[in-house]
Amino acid sequence: MTTDSKSIILISNGIITPGYLQGVQEVVFQKFGLPVIIMENQGELAPFFDPYRKQYNANELLKDTARLAPANAYKTIGLYRVDLFIPILTYIFGQAILNGPTAVVSLHRLKNEFYGLKKDETLVLVRFKKVVLHELGHSFGLKHCHQYGCVMNSSTYVEELDQKSNDFCRQCLLILSSALKD
Amino acid sequence: MANEISILIVDDEESVRDSLYNWFIEDGYQVKCAEDAKKALHMLEKEKFHIILADIKMPGMDGLEMHRRIKAMHEDAIVIIMTAFAAVDTAVQALKDGAYDYVTKPFDPDDLSHMIRNASKQIQTAEENKVLKETITTLENVGDLVFESEAMTAVLKEVEKVAPTDSTVIITGESGTGKELIARAIHANSPRRYLPLVSVHCGALTESLLESELFGHEKGAFTGAMYNRKGKFEMADGGTIFLDEIATISTKMQVELLRVLETKKFTRVGGNKEILSDFRVVCATNKDLSSMVKEGNFREDLFYRLNVFNITIPPLRERTDDVPVLVDHFIDKYCSSMGRPRMKIENAAIKKLEEFEYPGNVRELENIIERAIVVGNGKEIRQKDLPGNKESNFSSVESISELEQKHIQQILDKYEWNISRSAKALELDRVTLYNKIKKYKLKKPKK
């Protein structure tokens, strides 16, 4: 498959909740102003499963996302519902290569029920959008921002995700617009 | 701050290096990686890293050995040891050897972020401290002393000799020669410089006040002692106490002072707990203490206890080479404080200033320049802006106390007997000014 050279590709890996993919597509388009294309991956995730950690290796999934990305894709982000880890950390919400072409995000730990709380699908989508924007931000060269409320603020807990908005602060917007012009 | 902090990741596993690299790069840190201890040490020889995150188990050289070698190269480097759960004992050993912290793999992302943030804060605080220490040294430095004469160079050499020791110093010199500045220079160049320099103007206080000032007092020790109060000796713990006008203290205080100097122990007024304080004594006087000892006005034992090292500051009239640089310094000082453009001074005026006797020494020269700036034309200090010889304060016939009396009277009149403003202008505290008014029987003119 080939796309416009400046499209953002969302690769869904089993995201079945109705409205999630469209919700993410809309917000990505709104924030980055680029065409956003959704792709479905039917491939097996088993090769990326670590039986010792009972989680999926995000480093390997990043490579897989790069492999699945259309030849001339601008940025590609893999969306998952499985629990992600990188060897050095117990878990991650998502990962991107700074200024790189790919990123991965999972909604596994964004769900209230993971923490023993009442299911709230609307809240999951809100969190999911923030993590996707954050990782895409990294892929456009943005680093963690110390501005309270900026979507590029670092979040290691869902409670921190809930504290921030899905907007980029002025400073991050400036860097982003310059990256988008390149 | 993050983008100023550099991190070196040392781990033989590529995936660990890459993951940490990505994690810290996103946080804005400067990150480099090494796959083993040997390479890391080689990198550390060439450049400095603020934080080194090292795996404890690596082929060739383990993290513990590497940590020891890093500490030998960069004592202030922050080393965080990464360990598997099974190697916690070894990590504890690393902590005992001075490692900053350890983390067990895999880390909780929040723990890792917090640890690095805390380490960064420590680095920032250490750097701020360094800057502050440098600032303090500059402020208290000998740079505050302005001179060009050989006589003052010799004084500074003496300061240089005695400052690093713990010896008691007596600074003698006429009034206005800068004894306190020399005391500051001694303190600023001593190992005690980061601890307080506490000044006590003995002449300004009555015997009972001086006792309370030096030793502190307990609540209820006397009428008005509402709270416990630390004395100057206690405040000077670790630092230096500067006792100005030491010759003025009473016989009773001389005994007390001798006891404290010998034991470094004292009790607060009205208290019974013995307090130990480690202070260095620098004192100053414009009197000849050895003559006072002969006359029986100063205890001989105290004199010998204080007179370990004597620095004598020559009067300004004996070092006229200093006059031009001092004049320059005071013109800068007062033009800047009065918000005026920098004034020049005509050669004739400098020549005249070099001929004065200056019984009030540098302080007197300072007052002359301040006055000349006020009365002058705003561009240049002229000979006529300086006080004339006949009416001047510089007649060598007059004694210092007569001059002082006249000068205080003039200042009081100038500020319409506002004690606070006059005391400020005279660089005295209000109590001293009241004492001097009483001593010279000065009176407010009737309107």
Image (tube, coloured by chain):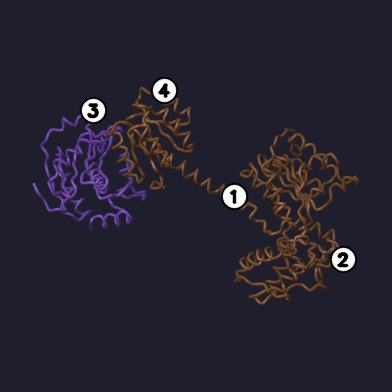
Chain colours: A purple, B brown
Q: Residue at the location (63% across, 72% down)?
A: B343
Are labels 3 and 2 on one chain? no
Q: Residue furthest left?
A: A1
Viewer-nearest of discs 2 and 1: 2
Q: Are marks 1 and 4 in contact (CB under 8 Å)?
A: no
Q: Residue furthest front?
A: B150
Q: Nearer the viewer, residue B408 or A18?
A: B408
Are labels 4 and 3 on one chain? no
Q: Which residue is mark 1?
A: B136
Q: How far, Cα to Cα, is label 3 from label 2? A: 100 Å
Q: Is residue A115 visible?
A: no
Q: Quadrant location of residue A122? A: top left
User: Residue B418 in the image: x percent, y percent?
Assistant: 73, 65
Q: Chain of mark 3?
A: A
Q: Which residue is mark 4?
A: B89
- Is residue B381 shown above or below B13? below
Q: Chain of mark 1?
A: B
Amino acid at the residue labelled 4 = Asp
Q: Secondary structure at mark 4?
A: helix
Q: Quadrant location of residue B143? A: bottom right
Viewer-nearest of discs 3 and 1: 1
Q: Which residue is mark 3?
A: A54
Q: Which residue is mark 2?
A: B397
Alpha-carbon neighbours of circle 2 within 10 Å: few (<14), some, or many (≥20)? few
